[in-house]
Image (cartoon, grey):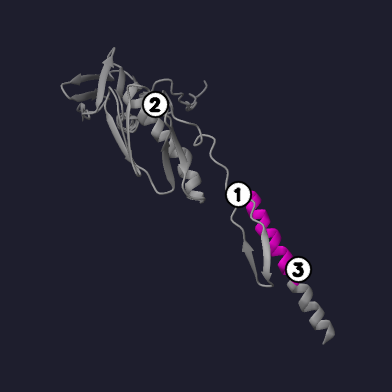
Amino acid sequence: MLESSTMASSSITSSFQTSNLRSVFLGERNRICVPGVPVTRNGFLRKAIECKESRIGKQPIQVPSNVTIKLEGQDLKVKGPLGELSRTYPREVKLERDEDGIIRVKKALETRRANQMHGLFRTLTDNMVVGVSKGFEKRLQLVGVGYRANVEGKDLVLSLGFSHPVRMAIPATLQVKVEENTRIVVSGFDKCSIGEFAASIRRWRPPEPYKGKGVRYANEIIRLKEGKAGKKK
């Protein structure tokens, strides 16, 4: 009877130590120290520790003199010489504006999702400020025999080897121009819209892996396959 009670107590102690080590190991793997404080033999009380700020999220955003900022709760409106943008922020982050016009994005909660949203929405906010003041552009290149592009009114017409030309409506907030019939420049103040429209152009004829023919981004590196070698005589 004494031996059985001793074995039971030793098994409880070993399970307690194993679960404690597991909780500390998982915390170190997520770069968050989560110490376990024993309450009873069957449970732990975990202490919440404040996480570090994102290196990108904690950087301030400089607002130029020709840009107007309007902040109302979780809604932000940015107006500049090129256009106007607005965005609604989630509850995990909050915006603060200094007296000298600098915007700071901070975490409102200490959760994993807040850590993810911190750097993301700081970058989105900076893109809004830069977009309405300076603008963005995306360049594409047509590679292939007979591949051509031109702008007709409010449409972009592409000849990409199909039996018919591809006609795409240009969004009202974007400007598209064609250089030397094979270079397309998409510009505007909304970086998200520019990327989406450029991706839709590339989607019609992605670069093929043997000769690289198709629509590619400027300075995009296409890894070509070697292909089948001819039969040696």
Q: Which residue is denoted by mark 1 in the rendering?
A: 30
Q: Give the residue displayed 51% in from the left and 36% down from the top.
A: 58
Q: Which amino acid does the dot numbered 2 rest on?
A: Val
Q: Which amino acid does the dot numbered 3 rest on?
A: Ser
Q: Which residue is denoted by mark 3 in the rendering?
A: 14
Label 2 environment density (alpha carbons within 10 Å; few <14, some 14–19, many ≥20):
some
Q: Is residue 162 left or right of residue 15?
A: left
Could you tell me residue 6's position as x and y percent? 82, 79
Secondary structure of the residue carrying numbered label 3? helix
Instruction: Judge depth for marks 2 and 1 and give the one in front.
Output: 2
Q: Is residue 8 left or right of residue 230?
A: right
- For the record, the magenta segment spans 13-31
Query: In the image, is residue 30 above or below residue 77?
Result: below
Which is more N-terminal, label 1 or label 3? 3
Q: Please tell me whether the stretch drawn in magenta is mainly helix, strand or loop.
A: helix
Query: In the image, is residue 47 above or below residue 168?
Result: below
Q: Give the residue displayed 72% in from the left and 63% down from the top.
A: 18
Q: Closer to the camera, 162 or 178? A: 178
Instruction: Judge depth for marks 3 and 2 and give the one in front.
Output: 2
Q: Which residue is denoted by mark 2 in the rendering?
A: 63
Give the mark count: 3
Could you tell me residue 36's position as x and y percent? 67, 61
Is 146 within the magenta?
no
Q: Closer to the camera, 25 or 147? A: 25
Could you tell me residue 81's position as x and y percent? 28, 22
Query: In the image, is residue 85 above or below residue 216?
Result: below
Label 3 environment density (alpha carbons within 10 Å; few <14, some 14–19, many ≥20):
few
Could you tell me residue 74's position as x and y percent? 35, 44
What separation in Å lies between label 3 and label 2 (alpha carbons)?
58 Å
Where is residue 142, by image quadrant?
Answer: top left
